[in-house]
Structure formats: C-alpha cells, structure tokens
Image (cartoon, helix red, strand yellow):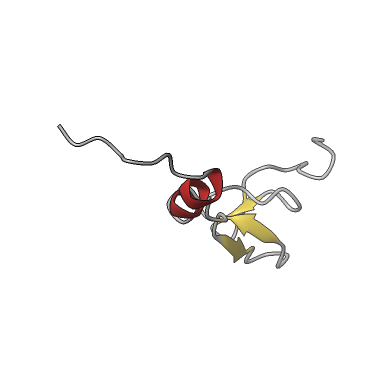
C-alpha cells in the first residue's frame, strides 16, 4: 500500500482544494416589466411579475 513519505503542507493542500470547491454566482436576468435583476424562473420582488405578467398584486408591500 502506498504511504506518503512526507506530510503535505497546509498551503499545498489548500492550493489543490481551492479550484474545485468554488461557489458560482446565480444567474440573474432582467425583469420584462420593470428591468430589475431577478433570479431566472422566479417572480420579480420589485413588481410581482413573472414572464411579463403580474402574478403578485402587492409585491412591494408584501415585505
């Protein structure tokens, strides 16, 4: 069975791990009604529109 000859340093270990565990930012799209940035396939938090139609009447006051 293969056994490492020397202990790997923390810097060397962390360099190897850094590239594979990065989180990616969610893709944002513009609302067709108001132009605010929203998550894709989600109701706009600003105007309550989804796919160009208003589905939540009082989105601004719902907070």
27 or 59, which is in the foreground?
Answer: 27
Image-based side of 35 in relation to 41, left or right: right
- Taking 28 as reference, is 47 left or right? right
- Asked whether 44 or 22 is in front, the reply is 22
Q: Nearer the viewer, residue 51 or 26?
A: 26
Residue 41: percent from left, percent from top: 51, 51
Question: Which residue is rendered at x = 30% and y = 39% of the image?
Answer: 4
Residue in the image at 82% along x and 35% along y: 63
Image point (64%, 63%), residue name: 31
Q: How many marks?
A: 0
Q: Nearer the viewer, residue 1 or 13?
A: 1
Spot occupied by residue 34 in the image (x, y as percentages of width and height): 73, 65
Give me the residue at 44% from left, 53% from top.
16
Residue found at the very far right of the displayed protein = 61
Q: Residue furthest top?
A: 1
Residue 35 locus on image (x, y percent): 70, 68
């Amino acid at each position: 069975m293969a056994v490492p000859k020397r202990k790997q340093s923390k810097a060397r270990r962390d360099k190897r791990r850094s590239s594979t565990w990065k989180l990616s930012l969610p893709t944002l799209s513009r609302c067709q009604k108001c132009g605010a940035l929203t998550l894709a396939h989600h109701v706009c938090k600003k105007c309550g529109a989804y796919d160009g139609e208003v589905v939540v009447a009082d989105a601004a006051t719902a907070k």
